[in-house]
Image (spheres, grey):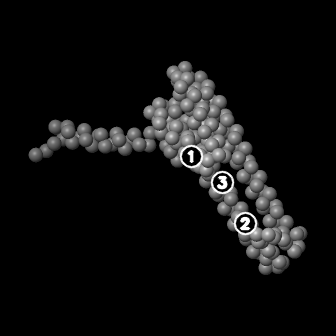
Amino acid sequence: MNSNIVKEEKTLATILHLSVFSKFIIPFGNFIFPLILWLTKKEKPFIDDHGRRAINFQISLFLYTVLIVATGIAIILFQAIRLDAQFPFVIGPDQFYIDEMGQAISIVITITVFAILLSALFILELFAVISASIKASNGENYSFPLSINFIGKNSDHHHINHQQSKNEQFNNPQNQTL
């Protein structure tokens, strides 16, 4: 536990992590609220680290969910089209029937597998966010599992330092020529 981190930063980092659960009330709340909290106190290293990691994890989860859903829909459509060539297959607002249920077992298995994958992703999110909140309240860092690093550390500081060095070179009398 790092004793240099003040209680206010620990509390804000904990709230930042827990704010991702706002997605159950407000669409995209899992991006909006952590982003607002992170950007308001980004100059504090502890908040910056936890904010970046929380946002990266949420973006990663969103991409994994889109990938799982898109793959599942594509496989189910492929199976349905293949099945439709041999047997009647009707999907409508008031009906869903397959003439030969034994032939459609692959669709049921596919739906089950992708439902399990999405459930596992949801459980991973719950576990990781709660673990990160506990670590933040203790003043410790947390690395999210399966998180892709979209927002790197000090990504904008390098650009600023590069600009300052050009200005310093221009203002340096030894580099000026007539």
Label 3 – label 2 distance at C-alpha: 15 Å
Asked if one can make out residue 149 in the rendered structure from this viewpoint, the answer is no
Residue at coordinates 82% horizontally, 61% vertically from top-left? Answer: 109
Assess disc 1: are there few (<14), some (14-19) or many (≥20) residues with their C-alpha within 10 Å of its C-alpha. Answer: some
- State the image coordinates of residue 40 (x, y, percent, origin top left): 47, 36
Amino acid type for the residue under numbered disc 1 = Phe
- State the image coordinates of residue 173 (x, y, percent, origin top left): 16, 37
Q: Are marks 3 and 2 in contact (CB under 8 Å)?
A: no
Q: Is residue 169 above or below residue 136?
A: below
Quarter of the view holding residue 79 = bottom right
Amino acid type for the residue under numbered disc 2 = Ile
Q: Secondary structure at mark 1?
A: helix
Label 1 – label 2 distance at C-alpha: 29 Å
Asked if one can make out residue 63 in the rendered structure from this viewpoint, the answer is yes
Say whether residue 74 is left or right of residue 106. left
Q: Secondary structure at mark 2?
A: helix
**Which residue is disc 2 drawn over?**
75
**Which residue is disc 1 drawn over?**
31
Q: Are marks 1 and 2 in contact (CB under 8 Å)?
A: no
**Which residue is disc 3 drawn over?**
65
Tell me which label, 1 or 2, sits earlier in the chain.
1
Tell me which label, 1 or 3, sits earlier in the chain.
1
Residue at coordinates 59% horizontally, 46% vertically from top-left? Answer: 29
Nearer to the camera, 59 or 94: 94
Q: Secondary structure at mark 3?
A: helix
